[in-house]
Amino acid sequence: MNNMKLNLCLLALALLAPTLLYPVFLAKVLCFALFACAFNLLLGFAGLLSFGHAAFLGTGGYVTGYLMIHSGLTPEVAILLGTIAGGLLGAIFGKLAVKREGIYFAMVTLALAQLIFFFYLQAPFTNGEDGLQGVPRGALFGLIDLSDNMVMYYFVLVIFIAGYWLINRTIHSPFGQVLKAIRENEDRATSLGYDVNHYKWLAFVISAALAALAGSTKTLVFELASLTDVHWHMSGEVILMTLVGGVGTIFGPVLGAGFIVTMQNYLSGGEMGNYIHIIMGAVFVICVLSFRSGIVGQLMKFKRNNF
Amino acid sequence: MKKTNTSVLSTVVSGAIAATMICSAQAATDGQVKLGILADMGGTYADICGSGCVIAAEMAIEDFGGSVLGKPIEMVSADSQLKPDVASAIARKWVEDEGVDTIGGLVSSAVSGAVSKVNADSKNITLISGSASNSFTTKACNPYNVHWTYNVVALANGTVKPMVQAGKKKWFFITADYSFGHALEGMASKVINENGGEVLGNVRAPLGTTDFSSYILQAQASGADVVALANAGNDTVNALKAAAEFGLTEQMDVAGLLVFTPNAQAMDPATAGGMRLTSGFYWDMDDETRKWSKRFEQRHGAIPSMIHAGVYSVTTHYLNAVKTAGTDDSDIVMKTMKETKPSDFFARNATLRPDGRMIHDMLYVEIKKKEERKDKNDIYKIIKVIPGNEAYSPMLPQCNFS
């Protein structure tokens, strides 16, 4: 019941927020929140640290952007195809990566993501460093014009809630229980008769597809798909978001994404612009040293101890 | 309990919708002139349009008197980090949320392209001073683009043509791998082919490359007369350094197609001396340029590049147009800008064409050798002045927004 009330409050906040804050900024926060949630499904619940999630974010973005510019599809179809493309890429990457564990898993995903980065850098359809500029937002179902920022925000909110719900559902399903079992003790899960690699692979594909969904949506919000989304910095940023918010908590990545994006937003304009990477590095170090369970994890601990 | 929740939800939703209706978009024509300057504060192009571009715009506002239409002129600035997505997000926030009328500075063609798209959608003027690609007044032209200072056509016509005509027929390109490099290489290749020369090959290096050795080796193996550097900023400096280290400068000519004064200053005079290039401005041309450049140097600590001077010139022209027109409405201001001839220490024999291209005299210069230099700021020797009509290509009919 308590959770229900909290969720309703948050929904109310999300619905009212664009009247006070700039809607494009909020839409950006939601896109990154979804991206971080997708990543958290893998790190927090299956215990797999992927260092190449930017590849899926970028793939979703490029596919959707390309389709919107060249094919005249409606945005929901373009987003769907972008998501599927990311999922397929995830299926291939996952097959290779789950064969290894720990640091080797991270290295395999990083290597594959770098491969994708250089592919997008050289492939003619991505326009290299320019990126896909001027992606039209189009009209949802051919009816609702998305060029208005308010409308776009609510569309992104719907996508975010759908993605968030799906992740929530996955975590609480029997499938999610098996993932948690693998995270806690892989050998025991194997001895119980679960095909561990298959479960890991499925989690990887779901996570990749949702990351691509976030990328596709982001491309529509900014009307731009660029190399930044496929760069390994982006893979690092999503780890930071998840860790700051609280790895393994459901709401943590959302808060972490909000925190990091807000920080980038306010720092990039002012005098501090040159130091943004230093500040983010410091936040990362402080987070890892003093509150490892992240903001949400720490709050939950506080609640458990005091109430 | 379930019922309460539903009613809470419906109240919230209807409240949100009502609030959305009340909130309306901010108008750009509010009589308050606000400029945004996007520059590269810490990257490859920081020397040619970083904090210097912000200072140049500040100087223009101060010299103009600080206010127009009865209100003080406001200015904001930000770091584009040379990334089109960062630039596009900042530009969008500025014009949609903060009432910015026009965005200037704009180094890197990828950044300018992204910003120009955002501005065209919201009918805001883009004052491009730092980018070279000619696409802003050709294939990506729109009624709100103003392209000042220089472009790839002027560079190719100014630098490449005399070299090919002097008998340097075989060319090899080391190109920055984004729209500017591609445009510059394409335009230079066209000029080479038209004048009976031949392009033997090219290699593309990502923006911000520090190690050019593999590219230099490819250039060395090509057997060309001239290796053309179709890049800019620190990329040119690093490429030339590598070329000197590999002995390439002794075997072939190296042509820097786009060299800015701060970069020319950073190059070793022993290798760069004698190199000829095209520039839109040189600080030591005459009394007028020296007077402004001294003031700029006092504030910035270095002599101005052509982009710095361009930012000052275009900002002044924009503010004059707002004053003459008596409004900050983009369409009217654009019309006024194109009707009045810009004239200051930078813009000589200048006109702003209906396609947004500013035509002015360009300079064909030679980098001085060590023994020719009086002090550290004495870099170029002006060989000739190229009239604007010879330097720039004619206007395309589809880009005529008169």
Image: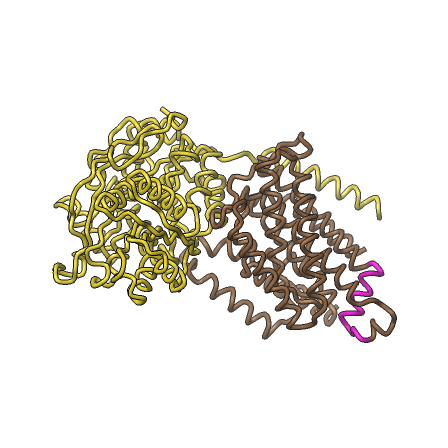
Quadrant of residue B11 within the rendered picture: top right
| Image-based side of A60 in relation to A198, left or right | left
The stretch drawn in magenta includes residue A180: yes
- Quarter of the figure with the C terminus of chain B: top left
Main SS category, magenta section: helix
Q: Which residue is drawn at 72% across and 70% down?
A: A306
Q: Where is residue B152 in the image (x, y as percent from the top left)?
A: 33, 42
> Which residue is situated farthest in the right direction here?
A192
- Of A106 and A114, the residue lying toward us: A114
Q: Residue B315: tell me if it is visible.
A: no
Q: Residue B270: tell me if it is visible.
A: yes
Q: In this view, does B298 lie above or below B382?
A: below
| Image-based side of B209 in relation to B353, left or right | right
Q: In this view, does A140 lie above or below A119?
A: above
Q: Position of residue B341 (x, y in %)?
A: 24, 30
The stretch drawn in magenta includes residue A94: no
Q: Chain coloured yellow: which letter?
A: B
Q: Give the range drawn in magenta.
A: A173-187
- Of A301 and A130, the residue lying toward us: A130
Q: Position of residue B297 (x, y in %)?
A: 22, 55
Quadrant of residue A300 within the rendered picture: bottom right
Q: Position of residue A57 (x, y in %)?
A: 62, 53
Quadrant of residue A173 within the rendered picture: bottom right
Drawn colour of chain A? Answer: brown
| Image-based side of A20 in relation to B41, left or right | right
Number of numbered discs present? 0
Q: Which residue is drawn at 57% across and 59% down?
A: A115
